[in-house]
Amino acid sequence: MAMPLKLGEGSDNKTYRGCVDEGGCISDYVAVAITGIVITFIGLGTFFIFFNRNTLEIRAKHVPLLLLQSLASVICILAFVMTRNIFKVSRKHLWQSCSVWQLWLEGLFGFGLLMSCHMARAYRLYHIFVGRRLPPLKSYQLLPLLLLPWLLAATVIQATKGVRNLPECDTSLKWRLLIIALHVSYPTVLIASAWRIRNIPFQFNEFKDLVKGVFLCFVFLGLWGALYVAKKVEEQPNEVLVLTGRFLFIVTGDGFLLFMFLIPILDPFRRLLRKRSKFHNFDTMGQVLKVPPSGVLNLPMSAFSFDQALESLLHHKKFRLSFLAFADSRMAGENVHFFDEVRELSKIPSNNTVQRIYMVDHIIESYIKTGSPMEINISHQMRSEILGTKDLADSNLFKSAVKEALKMMELNLLKEYWHSTFFLHLKEEIEADAQIEYVNSLEQELSSKKHYDPLLFSDNPFDQLIPFSDELKVKGNREVISRNDESAGRFYIEMSGTSLASSEMPSSHNKEPRTYPMSFSSTPGFRFVEAAEFTRDSEMHSRISPRLHDRLSVNSSEIDEGNTDCATNQLHSKVLSNSSK
């Protein structure tokens, strides 16, 4: 290998000219090292795309096009190195020829494929968000058409042997102009495509990505043109200029291709590293679009009934989650997921067409298209009608498919679900929650109404908080009993006895038992729930659910005959502690 010349030596030095003409200078190896680093980053980015291909933000950028971009970038980088005489290449074999690297790899499958992927993405965005319909041509059908100009130009130049296999690949002037025209025409078409979707408020910055790509493309073409002109101005360019131009061409080309590849995935990659992504932690497009969940969260548990149609049952969040878990355990959850996402779509206002189209496109890509990850079983005619719709924002687009999905769920899942452990757990949870909701409503009713009671207006703060505190202080013949008023659906506590000590109490209170509704609460302040433990009626305790029984804060085992003072002291301490708060 020839040693590179120091910058001060003249142009007649054969060592320096050999390095320039045959390759192998120090600057060339530095450029190769930078190229290797860039290829490594592109490889890591490709793995990131593949392993995160199911995240919503990556899927919105169209994963097949992203993978093709990574392949085109690597091919183009290698072609830059092979056609700029970085290595000493004899070019005796076909794979070493300039026509293969410059025309087919650098032009057709490198720069041409890279720009075609961006143009295909712009084409798809225009038809979906502006035309409100799926694009008539799929990506794998459009890409060959976009690459056709490169294919024809490469074929003609190859047939006329327009590429010269010098130490550094070169072409005649007319073919060089044709190649330059192709390099300029593709970003120009991409600008026109991006301009037509400039007013769409995209959720994942699709328009900004296209604009950044076009800007970088023209910057690189400008630098490439300036270096080429500087090299061709003189018949025999300065050696330093040749080496500098070759180095800068490789380095700027590497930077351009790296950033063109990273632009679509840079934001999700940065958010993932910082663990602040607002998209990748979401499971559905509805969560990304901030659509309210399809289950009715505020439906009272006490009003819930299983004697309803499946469509009505799925409106309830707890039932929907339980049924979905059961369906997933049977590897048949796609219909439930589809129904859930269509319900989220119905909550998006009809005038918000962009969000509706985002949601529709997500549903079609996930459930409707043949070969989709969670393809539902619908008829071919129904599938064709959805895919061929003229308005993606149509509110009735999935109406027939939802009916078909409900039939499939009722036929294949619902009967088996009623006998599953998922349903038994749901039933127990709903019954417990319904009881909690009911007794909490009693507390609100009690706090909102001010019943007349002489003890409520007593000067004693303890009496104001516990209306039946006088009865608990009485020593003598008295009994604490409880009863469950089935007709009213409420629990009551009764304090009865004739030897009441309060002289201020009206005579009616000495004859009739005092009855107070119980309130189970978790809110701050005194809770009347403690009174529930002042009973010897084991039947009442058995009627209280374990969840409610755990919330009782006074131990009933400590309440027996002759030990009511202990219970009173406990109540006193609880009232005083809550009053201080």
Image (spheres, rainbow, N blue to C red):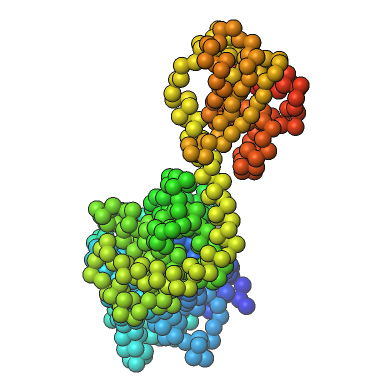
Q: Is residue 314 above or below residue 166?
A: above
Quarter of the image for residue 66 reads bottom left
User: In the image shown, does 391 or 74 lie closer to the viewer?
Assistant: 391
What is the quadrant of the N terminus in the image?
Answer: bottom right
Indicate the position of residue 438 as horizontal and vertical percent values: 50, 39
- Please name the residue shown 28% across and 52% down the image: 349
User: In the image shown, does 557 or 580 lie closer to the viewer?
Assistant: 557
- Please name the residue shown 56% across and 7% down the image: 504
What is the quadrant of the C terminus in the image?
Answer: top right
Q: Is residue 156 above or below residue 476?
A: below
Indicate the position of residue 111 as horizontal and vertical percent values: 39, 73
Indicate the position of residue 180 as horizontal and vertical percent values: 31, 74
Q: Is residue 335 above or below residue 346?
A: below
User: In the image shown, does 394 or 25 lie closer to the viewer?
Assistant: 394
Residue 221 visible in image: no
- Please name the residue shown 32% across and 57% down the image: 346
User: In the image shown, does 119 or 332 lie closer to the viewer?
Assistant: 332
